[in-house]
Image (tube, rainbow, N blue to C red):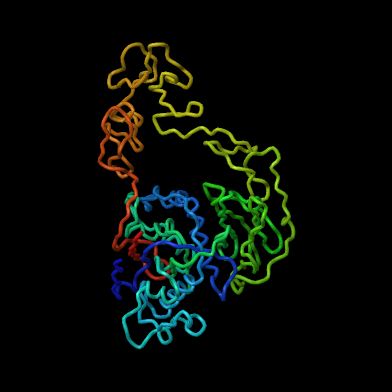
Amino acid sequence: MRLPRSLPACLAASLGLSLFALAGDAAAVGEGHDGFPNWSERVMLEWTNRARVDPQLEMGKCGAACGEGACFKPVDPIYWNQSANHAARYHSAEMAKQGFFAHDSKCALVSNIATLFPASCDGSAACACQASGTPTAWNARLSLFGIGAQGEIIASGQDPNGAFYQWLYENNTSTTCAYSSNNGHRWNILTIKGAMGYGMQGPSVGDFGGTPETGKIPSASHYPASGAVEFWANWFDAAGAPKLALLNLNGSCQPMAKTRGLTDGNAAYSAKATVSSCQRYYFIFEDAAGAQVTYPTTGSLGAGGGTCADWDATRPAAGAGCTCTPSCSGKACGDNGCGGSCGACSGGQSCDASGQCVTSAPTCAAPKQTCGATCTDTQADAANCGTCGHACGTGELCSAGACKAGGCATGLTQCGSGCVDLTKDPSNCSACGSTCSGTCTGGACLGPDGGPVDMGGGSGTSSGLGCYGCATTQEGNATPWLGIALGVAALGLARSRRRR
């Protein structure tokens, strides 16, 4: 595997964003371990997993800057790994103490840096660096912390929310479904599998690698530190939705709502509360079998900022609202009143306000419209000619929304019992039955990037020139882009390398 080229020192000092990557692994966070992780590091892991359950929600917010946004699908959570957390925080600290911004360390690190940091070395050159030698490469540094390097992302942002969105919303106008130097941070966050750890004691760092600590609640945290706070927790269980999802805040419990996620078994739950001083909290879930799952497994997290400990071995008692009896009487789906679910609908159905699964009317692309539970072109459908339910007589064709005996109007072609415009009908693009998944323009099927799309079926011949949305594997080198810079500079640079 080729190693990334090093950054020029003069350029690295002014950067706002950068990354490297190799391949994937996993880890889950709960109790604190010798001060790891801290609140900011927990937030970034939770933001990662809540984005992974429904990437399209985030891509919709990102807009044109996330050109390949349609490529991302829901994936399993990535889990916390303490060694990766340790390595990431060290790199954050050494960049802050030694005044640089790059993936590779500024000096040749002492071989026992993982033992020294943070107890007897704060990342300063005096304790971290050998007297001479080649600067330690980023992946070699991870190896010193016991991590098989899969990737690293760094950002100048020193607020967990701001840093995360520097990575997730990086600018890439290409619609190609492949890893590249322009979308590498986002691609890694939304696709790499396994374990990782974030670090923040200066610039933000994410290191991928290590052995996962799996669990049904892979991550959870709160943001902002105080004030109008949102509490988030991810749920991951092959058995489906939890029966119970509660936030215990200072001894009072409130139901959490499923806020993100396309499936019940891989979703993000949230609750809101106002926090003005240090308050202890933890999450209480109950799986489909009735077993209780808490996060953290023992102890509690702290909200309120300041000197409020991120994790403490004590936890608030179960007070008001903490005993909740799910109620699903007469309901096939929907909320059970305790943050859990009464069931999920399938087969294209959705859950109505009364908790019943009903057939949803489809969303139809023009020129088609909804007739019952199907999409049809009322300008060419003999069973729904001109309007839903209006059927043409025997031997008649539906042409331009009217039933006619004989041939089609000028400019239209008979396909089945209807008359269509082969230059713009996505179901008959250039030929009867030639379907177009993009936009049919002048008889050509085009994707969002204006390029040709392979068409399916039909008696005609499709373009065969390209397949919009097909994923490929690619390695890329860095190119600069103007991006958000928090705390360092207004120029960001994305550098990426990944091998699957």
Q: Is residue 278 left or right of residue 417?
A: right
In this orientation, which residue lies closer to the viewer: 388 or 291?
291
Q: Is residue 173 above or below residue 93?
A: above
Q: In which quarter of the view is residue 434 placed? A: top left
Q: Residue at x 27, y 31 (%)?
A: 443
Does residue 319 appear in this view? Answer: yes
The N terminus: image quadrant: bottom left
Q: Position of residue 480 (x, y in %)?
A: 30, 63
Q: Is residue 423 left or right of residue 385?
A: left
Q: Residue at x 36, y 50 (%)?
A: 68
Q: Residue at x 38, y 13 (%)?
A: 396
Q: Position of residue 490 (x, y in %)?
A: 36, 66
Q: Position of residue 452 (x, y in %)?
A: 28, 40
The C terminus: image quadrant: bottom left
Q: In which quarter of the view is residue 24 placed? A: bottom left
Q: Is residue 5 above or below residue 64?
A: below
Q: Is residue 362 above or below residue 480?
A: above
